[in-house]
Image (tube, rainbow, N blue to C red):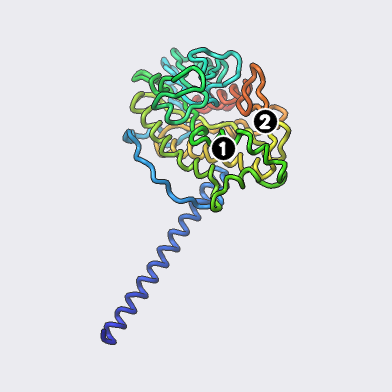
Amino acid sequence: MGEAEETKSTRSGIRRMVLGLLILVVVGGLVVAGVVVRRELFDVDLTEVLPPVDVPAPSEPAAPKQVSDPQAPLEESALRGRIDYVALGDSYAAGPGLATQRDDPASCARSTANYPAVLAASLGVATYRDASCTGARTADVLGRQIRPTGGPVRPQASALGRGTDLVTLTLGANDDGVSGDLLGGRCPELASQDPSGSPCRDSYLSDGRDELMTRVLLLRPRLVDVVRTIRATAPRAAVVLVGYLDLFPPDDGCAEVPFAAGDLTWGASLVAAIDATLLSVARSEGVRFVDVRAAGAGHDACSADPWVNGATSVVGAGWAYHPTRDGMEGVARAVLAQLTGAPPGS
């Protein structure tokens, strides 16, 4: 190779190196900006950028957006008309342990006092079908759910029809066992080891990455699939994603939430991340989202007026770590206020 060719090759290499550095700077800036946006919008402290997850494409194509603003109220004409309402979701919709429990089927632990029932009465709907079921995951909306007792439960989507006008959905916390692992006993058992630290979260760290938060990041495409299936099955229905009440206190814990201090913050961040995922899906799919964590602020399980039980189940008043009757009524008021555009509590 001659001197001129070497000089040309060197210059070309320098240009490639500079271009590569510029790309790294831009990409790095976008990643950091993404984390900042997530923290600002959703109050989720994502301390690491986790790798993308390889997931299958949704089975249904995207439909035109119903709304550009996830907090948009329903049209006045829709509120005046005949409303056929279907409720879907997991235990935070079903109301396990709240009097009175329904038997259709009993294994779903579905209450006549859950937020869908209160909302249906408040809206004065013409027809109302509650297909929510304790323990439900995203797969159980599209396929049969197997309960520990009582056998299989029909797919929740089978309650939908072309005449459905309104659908609410609270779902996602049970996927990949996130809520079960968070609340199943390990955190209280580990709290005494490091009361001011985060021993439970630390037990879920793998190579420095939070295993439960990683599972939450798997949730989004599944929720997209659920929303698209709902819209394909009930094409004229207004779809409303309803978030989760926060049971974790913002400061110190209590006997009813016996977590280490750092694990309280971590638990709250996981709930926030699930809600952030619901909001993200609502935005991308053009449906509505109701932030009930905001509505329930100050009503955590350690508060003087809890909307969520702590570690103890109360006969007739809800299972451990699940909404109380006041909590269900609070959620219903928040949904009603947003759908009607009225101030909360009016």
Question: Is residue 346 visible to the viewer in this orientation of the structure?
Answer: no
In terms of image quadrants, where is residue 212?
top right
Q: Residue at x 46, y 38 (%)?
A: 219
Amino acid on which disc 1 is placed: Val
* Earlier-in-chain disc, 2 versus 1: 1
Name the residue nearer the viewer: 203 or 92. 203
Q: Where is residue 300? Give x, y as percent.
A: 66, 32
Give the residue at mark 1.
271
Kindly identify the residue that appears in the image at 58 percent across and 42 percent down.
Answer: 269
Circle 2: residue type = Ala
| Helix, strand or loop status at disc 1 | helix
- The front one of 156 and 287 is 156
Does residue 295 lie above or below 165 as drawn?
Answer: below
Left/right of residue 7 with respect to residue 154 in the rendered view: left
- Residue to which mark 2 is pinned: 301
Name the one closer to the observer, 332 or 206: 206
Looking at the image, which residue is at 51% across and 51% down? Answer: 35
